[in-house]
Amino acid sequence: MYYKIVILICKFIYKFMKLFGKNGGTLPGNIALRLNKNILKHFKVSGTVIAVTGTNGKTSTTNLISNILSNVGSVVSNREGNNINTGITSLLVKNCDLSGNIKCDYLVLECDEHYIPVVFKDLKLDSFVVLNFFRDQLDRTGEVETLIQKIDKFLEGYTGNLVLNSDDPNVSRLGFNKDKCKVYYFGVEKFNGATSSMHDRGEGKYCPFCSARLEYDYYQYSHVGKFRCPDCDFGHNDTDSIVSNIDLKNGKFKYNGKVFETRYNTIYNMYNVSAAFMLSSLYNVSMDDLYASVKGFELNNGRLETALVNGCATVLNLAKNPTGANVTIGFMNQDDEHKELLFVLNDNVADGKDVSWIWDINFSVLNNVDRIITSGTRAYDMAVRIKNSGYDFKKIEVYPDIFEAVNNLYKNNGKKYVIFNYTATTLTRRAVLSYKGDKNGL
């Protein structure tokens, strides 16, 4: 009975915060876990439980899956993120009754990689989607191999559907020797931006089973691509969901013979789409529902968000690690127009205090970028990094204050791109989207 009292208290906290215009965030879940550390085992979900994890793309893929499945049933999801145990508990408290029952057809959860074993130790999981594993904030997430082993350990007792990225060796390896669960693979056909050599610092270079160096037919981005081990069967798995005929310039691709349209036209988003389609196929979603869901899909939360600001076309995107930043620069380079860039770098706890990852961003390939402004708590570090890439230092401006940075960004006309890391997201979006052209930037 005690857990019911905890749920009642946290529901009251949520309602109280809502009166003041707050969405609750992680606070109700934080309090629930403090009052009862085993609270998660008391939630009972009537429908299917789906989890999405990976270094990059969790929020976009979770929202796309939720968007698709809402066509065939009721969906509860942490669409805003809040993907650790406190945030997920908050979501469950908000949507359950006093007995912990959650009535929905699908519970779709974005979950931080480190918290998969924590959250799903007590909460039954039916389908698990793993997108990718890249080097992330080292002081927060540790080495990639440690993280992969943690997920692999969790999978030893997992009995549901396992949906894996066939083209990421760090993810594909998780499907081997998993006899208790049903394994499905998704992938993306070679696109015209694929390369014969790796231009980023990738992690999937050696076979995890026999240690031979992996051979690649091509790289899509970072270490993601068509690979195989020359000494064993690793890399020869059958792919169940393939997105093909990629046309990033016009935002089109083909799936199961049908041409789809999307505004999220980057190669890593094609993998997000392929993952969502693979998952959806397990729940009998029609092609028409897939098409409508993808064409109308728009996040507006700093993931390839577009806006007209002060008469200037502006694109905003989150990049919290080298791979995310390099793919964003690649997306920016598809645009042949002259443009200006604002890069906001923070080093708060959630970002990781160690910002050495910025030295793995490839700024030497910038195309028609006429000026770069840096901002955030580590604005000068970013400016030094860009200068050392060979970019003309006379075209770099540093404004640690975000509102001053935005004010100076829009003193010139023309196309703008804005890149920011995790804790810079909210303030940067507010500064850009509320900009009116006066000297205060608001």
Image (spheres, rainbow, N blue to C red):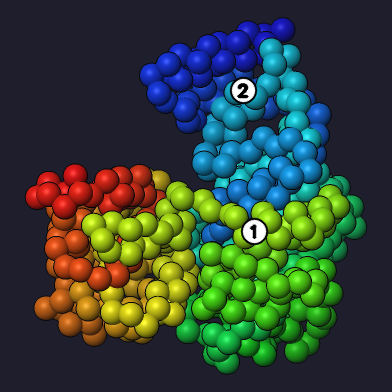
Q: Residue furthest front?
A: 311
Q: With 293 as the anchor, is 282 left or right in this view?
A: right
Task: Please tell me which residue lies in front, 370 or 353.
Answer: 370
Compared to residue 322, the image places residue 110 above or below, namely: above
Residue 149 position in % (x across, y down): 67, 58
- The quadrant of the rendering that contains the C terminus is top left
Q: Residue furthest left?
A: 439
Task: State the SS at label 2.
Answer: helix
Residue at x-position 23% and y-position 49%: 435
Task: State the SS at label 1.
Answer: helix
CA gap between label 2 and label 1 equals: 30 Å
Task: Please tell me which residue lies in front, 122 or 52.
Answer: 52
> Are the residues at dot 2 and dot 1 in contact (C-beta closer than 8 Å)?
no
In the rendering, which numbered label is found on residue 200?
A: none
Q: Which residue is mark 2?
A: 93
Task: Please tell me which residue lies in front, 407 or 28.
Answer: 407
Residue at x-position 74% and y-position 45%: 71
Q: With 270 as the anchor, is 301 left or right in this view?
A: left
Amino acid type assigned to the residue bearing label 1 in the image: Val
- The quadrant of the rendering that contains the N terminus is top right
Amino acid type assigned to the residue bearing label 2 in the image: Val
Residue at x-position 80% and y-position 71%: 256
Compared to residue 108, the image places residue 392 above or below, namely: below
Residue at x-position 54% and y-position 31%: 86
Q: Which residue is mark 1?
A: 294
Task: Please tell me which residue lies in front, 278 or 216.
Answer: 278
Q: Nearer the viewer, mark 2 or mark 1?
A: 1
Mark 1 Cα shell of 10 Å, populated few (<14), some (14-19), many (≥20) = many
Q: Is residue 409 visible?
A: yes
Residue 78 position in % (x across, y down): 59, 39
Q: With 15 as the anchor, is 64 left or right in this view?
A: right
Q: Earlier in the sequence, mark 2 or mark 1?
A: 2
